[in-house]
Structures are given as structure tokens and as C-alpha cells.
Amino acid sequence: MGKLLDFALHPIELKAAIKLRFLRSPLYSINDTRATPDLVECYKLLKQTSRSFATVIMELHPELRNVIMLFYLILRALDTVEDDMTIEHDLKIDLLRNFYKKLDLQKWNFEGNAENEKDRAVLVEFASILREFHKLKDDYKAVIKEITMEMGNGMADYIQDENFNLNGVQTIKDYDTYCHYVAGLVGDGLTQLIVLANFGSNSLANETQLFESMGLFLQKTNIIRDYAEDLEAGRSFWPKEIWSMYAEKLTDFQDPYMERKGVDCMNHLVLNALGHVEDVLNYLSSIHEQSTFQFCAIPQVMAIATLALVFENPSVLRRNVKIRKGTTCYLILKSRTFRGCVEIFEEYLREIRSKLQVEDPNYLKINIQVSKIDQLIEEMYQEKLPPSVSPKETEIYLKVQERTNWDVKVKPVQDDEDYRFNLAFTVIITLLLAFFVFWTNTSQFLN
């Protein structure tokens, strides 16, 4: 009933949900995902570990679909080792530091996870992953192996860091470093794969700050949102350098008397995350292949929507909050073009600014950061210039013009879906009205 009420109150989201579920056609056939029993097993594991990632990965171009699916499952296996607190300490460290070497083996799996460990099946069935991994092009395999090595060693370093285990993240620099190992490296690997497939600008692989920001923006958003959940699990990732400005202990924010301080701290962390948005938009403008663009864009628009949801929201201090399912459907459809992504960012930046209180300690800094993003967007399109003034052909302007040419190819598909939706919706409403008239007349006759 709750979801039905949400859709009734948000008809645009209802329209998006219907289009996404019944009318949208995938860009590419998914027949190749069932080519071998091992591949079938891999996609089964993908759906078990993350239905949302499975959906976007399944829609990727065939050149990268299996590559990114295997990349995801390998890192998920690594993460499952790191998360499982039942694995003996020295064994865990050895597994993490040497996990990348397992990718050279023809057959290997691990059954040492606790029975109730959520994703243990990825390690138990790792032999299927290995057999498909060895079928990839050597360049793709090299990238996946390199990122697995760096991430595994980074995870091991944090486990062996007694100060981190006792006190959590201390400085903003530590915060960025932690997010680099768990998310920035993923952005690095994905970017290398995209460039190897010729689906993005060749310079993208060397623009470290851009792909680093792609990962950090997502990870920081999750860390802000998961405050209550992480505390309940005995973890803390909010950096002390920020939260100590508002409280003596991180847990203090759950005290009702400290709620305002907790919200101010959370808004400060949102400000920190917003510092990555310009890089995110710059990165997205550099992706040329449509399915890869959607794969990169969807998590980013979800992140800005989540940031707007948590901003000035005291509920985050007590429970995990999430954007509505209907909102997710709307964002997936609208983010198919770069212009659509930009409009989503503008929409949620306006929402953040509308919630901002003058009393917030970071009132000016948040306004300045949002204004910087607005200025970048103006530079991207330069649509407010007088008719007699030509746009400045800056690097970002030219990149966006090139990306816009790709967006034009997507529009006919959207127009066709809108036509089919409107036709289907008209038929449904007509049938409902006909049923209502029939029922009313029948009731009168029986009476």
C-alpha cells in the first residue's frame, strides 16, 4: 500500500516505472550471457549479490558486458573475504594480499566463509569465474588483476592498522585514502577498460582526478547515509577531523539534544562530497558509447539524489534512509542523455540550496560550492549569451558539444517509448472507464 500511495502522489514516477518495466527495450541482445554453463553461473551469482548492478551490467555493450561482470564478481569476492569477521586474522591478510595471484590459476575456490556470510557463494563458485576470466582479452585481464592487487593490499593495510581499527577514520586525507581503496580504484579500473574498448576519450585514462572523483563521490554519499547502520555494526567512517568540530564522540549525535549538531556535521560532509561533482560531470561528458554512459551515469545521479535526501535530514542519525523506488525509475530513464544527467544534478542542487539554513556553520561554503557547479554547467552550454555573442570554445564546452551529438541518437528511442506509453496508458484508462460504466449500469439493473 505504501508504494501505491507513493506512486499516486508522484505520477511522473509512476509513468517512469511503467516505461522501465514494460516498454523499454535493451540496447543489445543478452543471448551471449548464456553461452556456457560457467557464464550462466556467473550471471546467477551477479543477480544474487546485487540485482541493481545486474540490471545495468546486463545492458552493457557486448564488448564490455562480461568483462565488467567478472570485474565486479572478483572485487565482490575480495570484499567478502574482507567483511567476514570469522576468518582467522593471518589467513585473511594472506588471502587479501595474494588474491590477485589466484587469477593466474585455472581452478581455485574458497569455502572458509561463515555459512551465513551473504555473498559466500561467489567464493565457493569462484572456479566458474576463473574459467570465464581466462577467456577475456589479455589487456582486460591485466587491468582487472592490477586493480585486484591494489585493492587487496589496501584492505589488508587497513585491517593491520591498529589506530584505524580502534579510532576509525581520523583526517580528511585519511577519509579520501580509504575511499580511494574501496571505490576510487574501481573508477580507475573501469576507466582503463572503457578506454581500451574505445568507448571514451583516450585522455580519460590519464585524468586521475576525474575517475577518482567518480568513485569518491559514490562512496562518500554511502558513508554519510549509513551513519546509524555503521555505528550499530561497530564501525565508523565519518572523519574525526570533521565530526570533532561538532561533538566529543561520534555517537553523541544520536542523543536528541545533539541532533542539530549532528545535522550540521552531516551537512559539512555533504559539502565535502559536493567537491567532486564538477569532476563527475566532466568525466561523464567524456564517455561516448551509450550503454557505457548509462552504466557510469546511473550511480552518479542516484548519489546526488541521495545527498539531497540526507541533507538537513535528522532521520539519518537514527536509521538508513533511501530514495523512493519510483524516483529510481525516473532517474534511470532521465539519465540516458548527458543533458538529462545535468538537469538531474541541477534539480537536486536546487533542493539542497532550498533546505540550507542561514544558521548552518557552512552556509556560505555550501552556497559557494553549489555556485561553482552552476558556473561549470553554464560554461558547458553557454545558452544565456546574447544572440550576437559566440560561445567560448573551452575544453569542457567542446566536450559537451561532442557528447550532445550522441544524445541526439538516443532521443528517437525515447520518443518511440513515449508514444507507446501514451498509447498503452490511453488503452488502460479506456478499459477502466468502460469497466466502471459497465459495473455502474449492472448495479443499477440489479437493484
Image: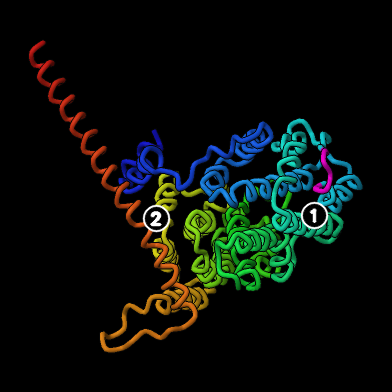
The residue sitting at 71% across, 42% down in the picture is 132
Q: Main secondary structure of the magenta part?
A: loop
Whether 105 is among the magenta residues is: yes
> What is the quadrant of residue 135 in the picture?
top right
Instruction: Choose between 201 and 8: the one closer to the eye.
Output: 201
Quadrant location, the C terminus: top left
Picture coordinates of residue 37, whole percent (x, y): 67, 31
Disc 2 secondary structure class: helix
Tell me if I can see residue 148 in this picture. yes
Picture coordinates of residue 168, whole percent (x, y): 76, 59
The answer to whether the residue labelled 1 contacts the one labelled 2, judged by CB atoms less than 8 Å apart, is: no
Tell me if I can see residue 344 in this picture. no
Magenta span: 103-108
For residue 37, the mark is: none
The residue sitting at 76% across, 57% down in the picture is 151
In this image, 236 relative to 298: left or right?
right
Q: Is residue 142 above or below residue 390?
A: above
Q: Residues within 10 Å of mark 2 (few under 14, many from 20)?
A: many
In this image, 220 relative to 394: left or right?
right
Quadrant location, the N terminus: top left
In this image, 302 relative to 378: left or right?
right
Dot 1 amino acid type: Gly
- The residue carrying mark 2 is 334
Dot 2 amino acid type: Lys
Mark 1 to mark 2 CA distance (whole Å): 36 Å
- The residue carrying mark 1 is 152
The residue sitting at 57% across, 46% down in the picture is 53
Disc 1 secondary structure class: helix
